[in-house]
Image (spheres, rainbow, N blue to C red):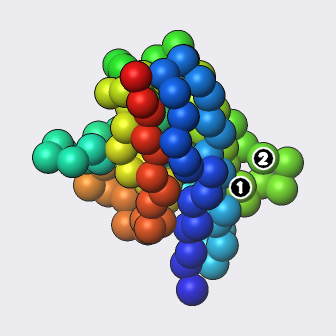
Amino acid sequence: EVQLVESGGGSVQAGGSLTLSCVASGFTFDDYAIGWFRQAPGKHRERVVCINSSRSSTHYGESPRGRFTMSIGTAKNTVFLQMNSLKPEDTAVYYCAAGHLLVDCRPMNDYDHWGQGTQVTVSS
């Protein structure tokens, strides 16, 4: 059974930091692209960052670029999203996802495994 479980969300003041975790199981981790996505109330879901299955290319969205960093844990089935200099506009439910994308990790519709999400709230 494929599972993706996010954790680490919470409330923080603007300028603060949070680190989200995603533990994956039930599939061959190294064969899948991994992405972090977010959705704020009334807005479309958007890509925050993704990494391809070969772990050679990482793509950040415009807003989090320079502030957020994705990394792979030493256990190899855990991914992190380090979020620095948080802004109120970053408030959203954050999801991790996995998909069998061969080359480009960016197409959101190609991700077929999704976690339940974790809430991040940034106050001004």
Q: Is residue 72 above or below residue 48?
A: below
Along the line of sight, the residue nearer the viewer: 115 or 60: 115
Left or right: 106 as drawn, with respect to 5 = left
Q: Are marks 2 and 1 in contact (CB under 8 Å)?
A: yes
Residue 99 visible: no
Q: Residue at x 52, y 42 (%)?
A: 11
Three-letter code, disc 2? Gly
Along the line of sight, the residue nearer the viewer: 97 or 18: 18
The quadrant of the picture occupied by the C terminus is: top left
Left or right: 95 as drawn, with respect to 26 = left
Q: Within 10 Å of the Cα at label 1, are there few (<14), some (14-19), or many (20+) other Cα atoms?
A: some
Q: Residue at x 52, y 27 (%)?
A: 13
Along the line of sight, the residue nearer the viewer: 91 or 78: 91
Q: Position of residue 44 (x, y in %)?
A: 18, 45
**Which residue is label 1 attached to?**
78
Residue furthest to the left in view is 42
